[in-house]
Amino acid sequence: MTWSISSLLAVTVGGGAGCLVRYLVSMLLGWTLGTSFPFGTLTVNAAGCLMMGLAARSFVAGDPWRLAIMIGFLGGMTTFSSFALELFLLFEQGRWSIAVSYGVVTQVLCVALLVLGWHLAPLLQGKIPLN
């Protein structure tokens, strides 16, 4: 794998933007829906999986946007480590039903959205006629 200053910059800028989006979504959902369930983490992980499915099918290796979006932005925005910590804390607090529902919903939703993004990508690129 080769790297360059431009590839490092693309990942850095994309990652910063993804982190900012994650923070804003988490704050907004915390204010509007409350903090009893980790809606922010679930939302960014689900949206990130949909976008990863779209991006994985849209960009080819070597495309400079691939680095910025797939590694930088989506890597900064999605939060598997936050998901794992929140899941652990829910179990630790004895909130078993919320923990199990959060774990199952996150896994099923994120994989389903990744597959959806994968199949939507050709439509969005105009490769499949809509009529």
Image (cartoon, grey):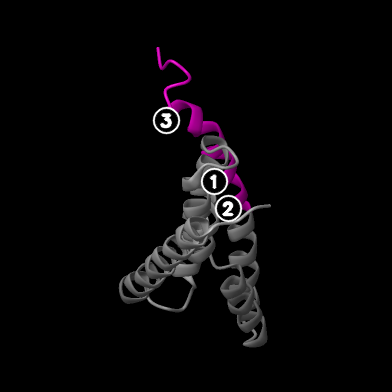
Q: Earlier in the sequence, mark 2 or mark 3?
A: 2
Picture mark count: 3
> On the image, numbered disc 1 is attached to which residue?
113
Q: Is residue 35 above or below residue 117?
A: below
Amino acid carrying label 2: it is: Cys
Mark 3: few/some/many CA within 10 Å (<14, 14-19, 20+): few
Q: Earlier in the sequence, mark 3 or mark 1?
A: 1
Q: Residue 123 at x, y = what percent?
A: 45, 26
The image shows residue 88, relative to residue 58, as above or below, that is below
Q: Which residue is mark 3?
A: 124
Q: Residue at x 56, y 36 (%)?
A: 57
The range drawn in magenta is 108-131
Q: Main secondary structure of the magenta part?
A: helix
Label 2 belongs to which residue? 110
- Give the quarter of the figure containing the C terminus: top left
Query: What residue is rendered at 51% in x and 62% in y?
Result: 8
Q: What is the spatial separation of the Cα atoms under label 3 and label 1, in whole angstroms?
A: 15 Å
Amino acid, disc 3: Leu
Q: Report the amino acid beneath label 1.
A: Leu
Image disc number at residue 28: none
